[in-house]
Image (cartoon, rainbow, N blue to C red):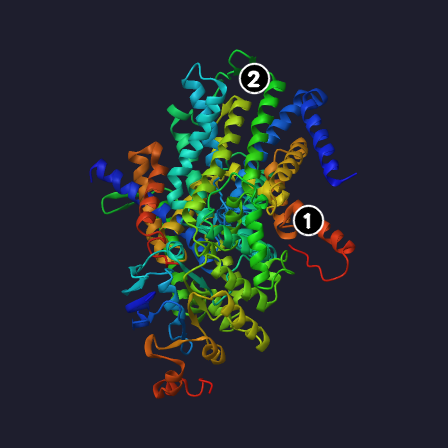
């Protein structure tokens, strides 16, 4: 059987599994999957900055949180707002925040970029805590109406049903991941990678570096906002925790575990992270401790993450079967 | 002196005390940045760890002074071990790897203290000799706050003396501003790294012990101080001790008076200050252009 | 005149690096800038190509005042530059490197609508360039794994990829063996046909075989300008170099 045929079969099986999932695994695991999906998109959006453009953000939670608060506030204040517009408002909030920050952020890189993001995200967190009237402070905003998914005249699906929400979330998150994947395959995606390797040379090829970085930044923030908005809808709650620095460290950890050099690494990392959190939380409340330990181990002994292992193994396999000649292991 | 002025002065003293402690923490942070090019995200965790150690020493031996002596040293040793065994290994992967590693370390410490000491806040009492108030020039000052300021000044004075009059100090200063060059001159840079890292952590540890009676020992101790120290370092200029000193005092006072007047949004003042400084001097008040 | 600098001066923290440099380069010329280390050659390049703005003086490109313009603007106006320290995309393959240059030339900067691998004309052009610089065999090798000579060839090709009217080459043959140098000179000659070149070089054989005119820079000042014969005979140049000028 040809590799393409195999890929089609594999893909169809995966799709079928995805569609049947809620009926195969029940409510609890359906919700676990939705959580995984949310953080997978969140981590992928983060890695757009790190793995692809070489920018490490320690404050990505502010975009996640902006998406969440945007959607929650919209649904709280506009009583008959439909589902998709609510989602879009959340995303718009995240993009707006990125727009405001981008003039500064695209002109810094390296440690400065990382730490400025840490500072701004912390500022957002403090604001969310203190502006109780708007954000509900520590308790956050919750219990807002979750509108049904409605195509006027055709169908109206209640989103409070876990299975229905699963399909909605899977569609939105899956589409988002696909869009981001596609972007990395376009000429713009090539320039992004160029920025990571050698921003100076990129300028000397006639590209406007700050503007290019800005577009990546907006994309990354916007899709983090999508994840945050879906999160708010899923939990029917968003609080300052979404903006806490620990939520900024989460995509970092997931990406490092899964593999920073690959598009799918963060998704894998989100899955592994989810499994580890699940298992750890059965024995102790100190999940972050385990996460910290794993982060240390990964950075020291497997900085390319899980995908790094896979790629290295693949390269070794290829070398063994390659017809003579020197083959370099590309790290 | 009338009550209003008395209140202003009292706030001023509180602000100065916090500013001094802030400088103790920020000085280590800024020097490590100067040498290694990274901001040690775990730095504030060692500050907190030292506070917890001091609680333990107090619980076992009952002596605040012993705690002040021992706890920062233990914290510093741990810090040096982290540098030696962990950070150094990751050096090859560049700044990002180091930054992420410090994130991991901070997570482990932040959660680790909860495992050993629980999540409740642990009170520490001011030693009897430092209780009460002192009357100076028509005003009452809390003795402990004065002690804090005094201790910080003494420690910093000794540090400054070492840095600016000894040969070792000169080497350290050179390493902080250009470690590559110093390496080329045959100085044992790894050793200087360890020294700077250890001393910086020790200073943060001292601050941790000293602040414990004021704020109590609890798992969130690192959060506020960490953010403040970071703002100090960035605003004062990465690698600049004088910048850190100036901004620490400013922030200490901003904090103290801010809480008086803007209470809820006091933290925002701090970020506003940072934003304004960075808008005009992106490298900080005394930082050097990259 | 395609490039002209007027009284170009620059200093770093008080250290004078360029002093009233008046350089003029004719269209189609191959102009070499030589001088001992520290003479200010790379700084001159940096100022001309917009890496930094000069402390004083002006730069005119195609009769336009471009002093202080940013690199990307100058590249779009028709300049190209190679660097002393190889400045390619080290983790990308030779093919991807060349393709980046082509995307730059074609102005494909924000296209998010097509897969870049599916752009066959771009791919064809990239393979054509690879052929021209003899890197077809190394097409899928990451740039940092290329041999030094081939890596420098890639560097030069990137500098040329936007089809600049004026290209500045900063020590293109630095660190090369005899053979590699010969290949590099041949490559440069081929690639820069019909274009104007300003080349900084230490290898005097290269200078004398490529250059139409030579400018000698010393302590940030122009010591002499002229044809290779004039420079070879110039006493002041000889004194400054003391035997560095090969005869």
Q: Position of residue C2 (x, y in %)?
A: 34, 65
**Lateral position of residue B64 relative to residue B283, left or right:** right
Q: Which chain's residue wears label 1?
A: A
Q: Is residue A175 above or below residue B222?
A: above
Q: Which chain's residue wears label 2?
A: A
Quarter in which the N terminus of chain B is drawn: top left
Q: Residue at x 39, y 40 (%)?
A: A101
Q: Quadrant of residue C90?
A: bottom right
Furthest residue in direction top, as rendered = A153
Q: Which residue is mark 1?
A: A311
Closer to the camera, B238 or C245?
Answer: C245
Q: Secondary structure at mark 2?
A: loop
Kindly report the distance in space between the C-alpha atoms of the residues bearing marks 2 and 1: 40 Å
Q: Which residue is mark 2?
A: A159
Q: Residue at x 76, y 56 (%)?
A: A322
Q: Is residue A200 above or below residue C245?
A: above
């Amino acid at each position: 059987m040809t590799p393409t045929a195999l890929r089609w079969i594999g893909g169809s099986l995966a799709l079928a599994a995805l569609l049947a999932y809620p009926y195969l695994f029940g409510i609890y695991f359906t919700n676990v999957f939705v959580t995984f999906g949310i953080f997978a998109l969140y981590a992928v959006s983060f890695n757009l900055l790190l793995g692809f453009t070489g920018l490490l953000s320690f404050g990505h939670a502010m975009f996640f949180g902006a998406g969440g608060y945007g959607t929650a506030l919209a649904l709280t204040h506009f009583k008959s707002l439909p589902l998709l517009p609510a989602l879009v408002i959340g995303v718009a909030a995240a993009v707006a925040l990125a727009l405001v920050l981008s003039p500064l952020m695209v002109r810094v890189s390296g440690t400065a970029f990382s730490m400025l993001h840490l500072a701004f995200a912390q500022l957002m967190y403090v604001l969310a805590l203190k502006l109780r009237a708007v954000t509900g402070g520590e308790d956050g905003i919750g219990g807002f109406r979750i509108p049904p998914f409605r195509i006027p005249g055709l169908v109206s699906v209640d989103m409070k049903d876990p299975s229905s929400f699963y399909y909605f979330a899977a569609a939105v998150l899956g589409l988002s991941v696909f869009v981001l994947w596609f972007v990395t395959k376009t000429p713009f995606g090539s320039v992004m990678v160029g920025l990571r390797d050698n921003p100076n040379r990129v300028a000397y090829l006639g590209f406007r570096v700050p503007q290019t970085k800005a577009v990546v930044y907006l994309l990354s923030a916007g899709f983090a906002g999508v994840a945050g908005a879906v999160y708010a809808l899923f939990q029917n709650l968003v609080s300052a925790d979404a903006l806490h620095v620990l939520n900024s460290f989460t995509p970092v950890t997931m990406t490092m575990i899964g593999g920073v050099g690959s598009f799918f690494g963060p998704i894998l990392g989100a899955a592994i992270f989810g499994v580890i959190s699940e298992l750890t939380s059965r024995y102790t409340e100190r999940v972050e401790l385990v996460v910290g330990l794993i982060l240390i181990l990964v950075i020291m002994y497997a900085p390319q993450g899980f995908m790094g292992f896979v790629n290295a193994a693949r390269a070794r396999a290829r070398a063994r079967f390659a017809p003579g000649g020197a083959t370099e292991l590309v790290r | 002196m009338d009550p209003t002025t008395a209140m202003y002065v009292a706030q001023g003293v509180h602000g100065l005390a916090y500013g001094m402690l802030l400088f103790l923490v920020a000085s280590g942070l800024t020097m490590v940045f100067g040498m290694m090019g990274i901001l040690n995200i775990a730095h504030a965790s060692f500050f907190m760890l030292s506070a917890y150690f001091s609680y333990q020493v107090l619980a076992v031996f009952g002596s605040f002074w012993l705690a002040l002596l021992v706890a920062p040293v233990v914290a510093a040793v741990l810090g040096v071990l982290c540098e030696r065994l962990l950070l150094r290994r990751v050096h090859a992967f560049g700044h990002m790897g180091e930054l992420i590693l410090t994130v991991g370390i901070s997570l482990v410490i932040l959660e680790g203290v909860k495992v050993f000491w629980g999540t409740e806040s642990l009170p520490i009492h001011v030693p009897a000799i430092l209780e009460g108030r002192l009357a100076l020039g028509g005003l009452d000052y809390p003795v402990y706050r004065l002690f804090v300021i005094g201790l910080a000044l003494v420690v910093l004075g000794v540090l400054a003396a070492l840095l600016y009059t000894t040969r070792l100090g000169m080497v350290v200063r050179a390493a902080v501003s250009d470690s590559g060059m110093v390496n080329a001159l045959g100085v044992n840079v790894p050793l200087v790294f360890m020294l700077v890292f250890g001393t910086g952590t020790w200073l943060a540890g001292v601050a941790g012990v000293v602040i414990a009676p004021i704020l109590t020992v609890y798992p969130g101790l690192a959060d506020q101080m960490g953010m403040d120290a970071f703002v100090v370092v960035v605003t004062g200029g990465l690698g600049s001790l004088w910048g850190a000193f100036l901004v620490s005092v400013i922030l200490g006072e901003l904090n103290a008076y801010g809480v008086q007047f803007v209470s809820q949004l006091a933290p925002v003042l701090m970020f506003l200050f940072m934003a304004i400084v960075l808008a005009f001097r992106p490298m900080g008040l005394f930082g050097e252009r990259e | 005149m395609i490039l002209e600098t007027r009284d170009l001066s620059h200093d770093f923290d008080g250290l004078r690096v360029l002093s009233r440099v008046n350089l003029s380069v004719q269209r189609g010329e191959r102009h070499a800038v030589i001088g001992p280390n520290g003479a200010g050659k790379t700084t001159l390049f940096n100022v001309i190509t917009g890496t930094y703005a000069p402390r004083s003086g002006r730069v005119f490109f195609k009769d336009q005042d471009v002093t202080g313009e940013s690199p990307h603007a100058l590249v779009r106006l028709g300049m190209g530059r190679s660097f002393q320290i190889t400045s390619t995309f080290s983790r990308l393959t030779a093919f991807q490197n060349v393709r980046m240059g082509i995307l730059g030339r074609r102005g494909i900067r924000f296209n998010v609508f097509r897969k870049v691998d599916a752009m066959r004309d771009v791919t064809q052009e990239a393979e054509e360039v690879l052929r021209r610089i003899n890197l077809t065999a190394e097409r899928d090798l990451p740039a940092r794994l290329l041999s030094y000579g081939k890596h420098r060839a890639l560097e030069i090709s990137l500098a040329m990829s936007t089809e600049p009217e004026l290209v500045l080459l900063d020590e293109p043959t630095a660190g090369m063996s005899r053979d590699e140098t010969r290949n590099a000179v041949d490559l440069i000659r081929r690639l820069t046909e019909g274009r104007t070149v300003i080349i900084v070089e230490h290898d005097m054989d290269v200078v004398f075989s490529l250059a139409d005119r030579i400018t000698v820079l010393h302590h940030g000042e122009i010591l002499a300008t002229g044809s290779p014969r004039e420079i070879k005979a110039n006493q002041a140049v000889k004194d400054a170099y003391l035997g560095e000028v090969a005869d």
